[in-house]
Image (cartoon, coloured by chain):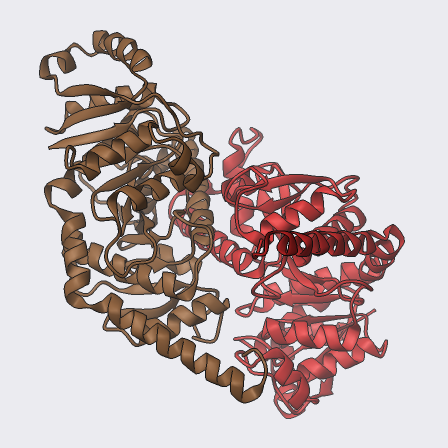
Chain colours: A brown, B red
Amino acid sequence: MRIVLDAMGGDRAPRSLVEGALLARTRCPAEIVLAGDESTLRPLFADLLKSRPEAAVSGGVSIVHAPEVVGMDEAGPAALRKKKASSLAVAMGLLAAGEADAVVSAGNSAAVVAHAKHHLGLVPGLRRPVLAVVIPTLRGNALLLDAGAHVEAKGIHLAQSAVLADAYLRLKDGLTRPRIALLNIGEEASKGPKVVRGAYGLLERTTLHFIGNVEAHQVLEGTTDAVVCDGFSGNNLLKFLEGVAEFLRRSAAIEPCLEPASGGSPSSNPWKEWAERMAARELGGAPLLGVLKPVVIAHGRSEAPSIANAVGEAFLSASSDLFRRMAEDCEQSRILSELKHQHAVYALERLKQTWRFGQKS
Amino acid sequence: MRIVLDAMGGDRAPRSLVEGALLARTRCPAEIVLAGDESTLRPLFADLLKSRPEAAVSGGVSIVHAPEVVGMDEAGPAALRKKKASSLAVAMGLLAAGEADAVVSAGNSAAVVAHAKHHLGLVPGLRRPVLAVVIPTLRGNALLLDAGAHVEAKGIHLAQSAVLADAYLRLKDGLTRPRIALLNIGEEASKGPKVVRGAYGLLERTTLHFIGNVEAHQVLEGTTDAVVCDGFSGNNLLKFLEGVAEFLRRSAAIEPCLEPASGGSPSSNPWKEWAERMAARELGGAPLLGVLKPVVIAHGRSEAPSIANAVGEAFLSASSDLFRRMAEDCEQSRILSELKHQHAVYALERLKQTWRFGQKS
């Protein structure tokens, strides 16, 4: 099993990626390939090896040269066109050619999304991939998507996110009928923005276990297994959660009561457990659901431990063949085709209404 | 000074409103008028007076009959048209006629907004009013708007919200040059949804102290005095904050470390102080900025103490003539006219681009 890291992507690249690779090797059997500028990576690698002699013994980390770098603020499609030899492009190319099993990047997520879509392709019938993040709740976890692959979404995009969430939770976590909800500002189908109301209408008509709308605070209560929203809302919610996690970590440093209880007595406070999990959560990566091969996006600010964890997640996805199984599942269930049909029916209805009343409905 | 309560609006109406009125009378010199179904209110009032004999002495609470009620899920404009004698319509009518100085409602906020706009009018040049909520931050408070008066917003609406926030913070809190920011998922002007980018372009060209974009977690850090966003985002953020506040309250009940430190030593943990203020914050109402007379909207789930606090805020606004002074300030500064001009220039530029390139820009 071979995992490629975009070694030049991220605020702390390439050091965090190289260190993360060495750390990952101590936990995970996959070979790691660092894609990036050779003249920078080789000395850095040699240098870090000195402080990690055990990694030198295990080997399994190699470097593939890539002379260009996609900037953190560069537009995805533009970078895709102009920088054919960026670390990101080279990494994706290896995965596409079957010379690697997964890609991990902490770089510009819009660029990662554009490159993944171009090099790897999407589940047939899917319009766009989405970034999914696991959020701890009072009763386990909830999947939040889109956490930022795109900014705005139409109703059909939200509905397709629900399909991906359902497949992911069934195939990865073994949930039989994952509960899927739309993030909204009220319970009724008539509430919220037009795109959410549209998605509600589409999802009501599928075989998914769609439980309706969920409000932001209810997400934490664990009333749903997946929360679907546009990337702007998802990214806002995620950043807000991270602000809260930061608060809890600082509180824990000063107030011992939020630290894990030692000794035998179980904690009787479910919120306290949530706080602990929240404080620990940032050490992970987010899978890009909907692409045909495994891509895990780590936070731009990731340090080596987060990179290593992202590699671990990529390894799990690749070794369980999760992405391919998801694509197969979507094709077999024909649910994306059903959605497409429903969406067309819905659009036709609205067109008829427009003709009938002579005004925009 | 006379404050009218929409006694039939809210999940716990009319009891919470009547009890809230009696509670408010013990703290605030204004007379209170309860608008609603007389046959329900009179016995309820008499009943509650028995448990609050001190309120019976101070007097100052009267009832005005209103036979209809706006439902919590009723569309605002429809209710306005059909239910001319609702408790909300009667309350607004009294305020509009100068027979009261402020309205407080815990009812259907879309209906309150529609009624306020219709009965009271808006600041000249303003397209829509917005709901503003005060959020505690590490360094004081931040005003969040729109917290839910409307669902979606165009760039011009966001820019106008900024104008209202600036006037409100200067006139109410005495800030000289309040910092105003747009809620966004990144710092750069090119980030985020189209409407936010449009608002950014407009706000850059005003005399407001516009500090650019702020990310959700930075709001808590106190880097800005006001955060501007659409109602969907604002309401999501607010509900999320309320979820966090709930967590903190439950933790405080079990973990003594979050309770205020007793004794002389000052707290060295700014996050702890934030947590305490967060836990206390729900007891208030949100002003509807942009209408010509004071309207305060309390949370639908408000109990008597929250209603009483909302009455207190309405009293402060009314006695300081805040809403009228805001309208005057906006007219004198001509900033809404400037925005209108900029917006027209901007729209013309985009139209020219469309003609030039033969495609939607």
Residue B144: image x %, image y %? 61, 52
Residue B46: image x %, image y %? 65, 84
Is residue B263 or residue A310 the one in the foreground? A310
Q: Is residue B143 visible?
A: no
Q: Is residue B176 above or below residue B30?
A: above
Quarter location, residue A221: bottom left
Is residue B56 or residue B106 the one in the foreground? B106
Q: Is residue B280 above or below residue A3?
A: below
Is residue B8 or residue B239 the one in the foreground? B239
Residue B319: image x %, image y %? 83, 61
Q: Is residue B198 visible?
A: yes
**Relative to residue B198, is residue A332 drawn left or right?**
left
Quadrant the N terminus of chain B occupies: bottom right
Q: Is residue B64 above or below residue A331?
A: below
Q: Is residue A158 above or below residue B202?
A: below
Residue drawn at (23%, 68%) of the image: A335
Residue B304: image x %, image y %? 59, 68
